[in-house]
Image (cartoon, rainbow, N blue to C red):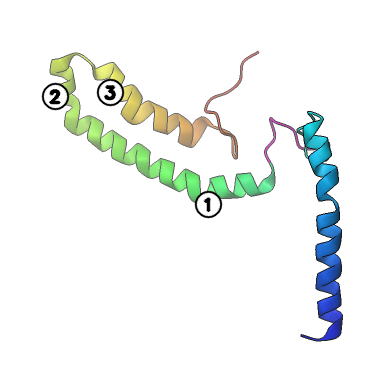
Amino acid sequence: MNLFRALAAVLALTLGLSTLPLQAADMSAGNVSSGDPVYSVDTPPFYSMLGDLIIARPLLLGATVIGTAAFIVSLPFTALGGNVKEAGQALVIDPGKATFVRCLGCTESGYKQD
């Protein structure tokens, strides 16, 4: 590595680490925002949305499909037991809400109603 790249790396790390005390003081004061007025608790950052889109949604879609198949297979037994509604809620509705109704990057399912 040449001298310019080493100096640039050290400078970038130094500047990046110098902001940590400011962020820690901001967090201890009770301010949980990222400092950017665009982000808030209701609007997750892009990396959260990207991870949700690439990793979580395909897994939740698979869980919804597998849960639907398990619900269909267990339907005679749940009908005899009288808990078809609870089985449908746990195996189909909850994973479906987490897959399709939850906003991208959010942690809670459903829409917020005020």
Q: Secondary structure at mark 2?
A: helix
Residue at mark 1: 54
Asked if the residue under mark 2 is in contact with the one under mark 1, i.e. CB atoms within 8 Å, the reply is no
10 Å crowding of disc 1: few (<14), some (14-19), many (20+): few
The prevailing secondary structure element of the residues shown in magenta is loop
For this rendering, which residue is in front, 33 or 51?
33
Could you say which is closer to the camera, residue 93 or residue 45? 45
Quarter of the image for the C terminus: give it: top right
Any magenta on residue 49? Answer: no
Contact (Cβ within 8 Å) of mark 3 with mark 2: no
What's the residue at 81%, 43% (across, down)?
A: 23
Q: Which mark is residue 87?
A: 3
Which residue reaches farthest bottom? 2
Amino acid type of the residue that numbered disc 1 sits on in the rendered structure: Ile
Q: Amino acid at mark 3?
A: Ala
Q: Which residue appears at 36% of the width and 40% of the height?
A: 63
Counting other residues with Cα less than 10 Å from the Cα at mark 2, is it few (<14), some (14-19), or many (20 or more)?
few
Disc 2 residue type (three-letter): Pro
Q: Secondary structure at mark 1?
A: helix
Earlier residue among tags 1 and 2: 1
- Reply above or below: 80 against 94: above
Q: How many marks?
A: 3
With 86 as the anchor, is 17 left or right in this view? Answer: right
Cα–Cα span, label 3 and label 1: 28 Å
Q: Which residues are magenta?
A: 36-44
Q: Residue at x 55, y 45 (%)?
A: 52
The residue tagged 2 is: 76
Residue 85 point in image, percent of width and height: 29, 17
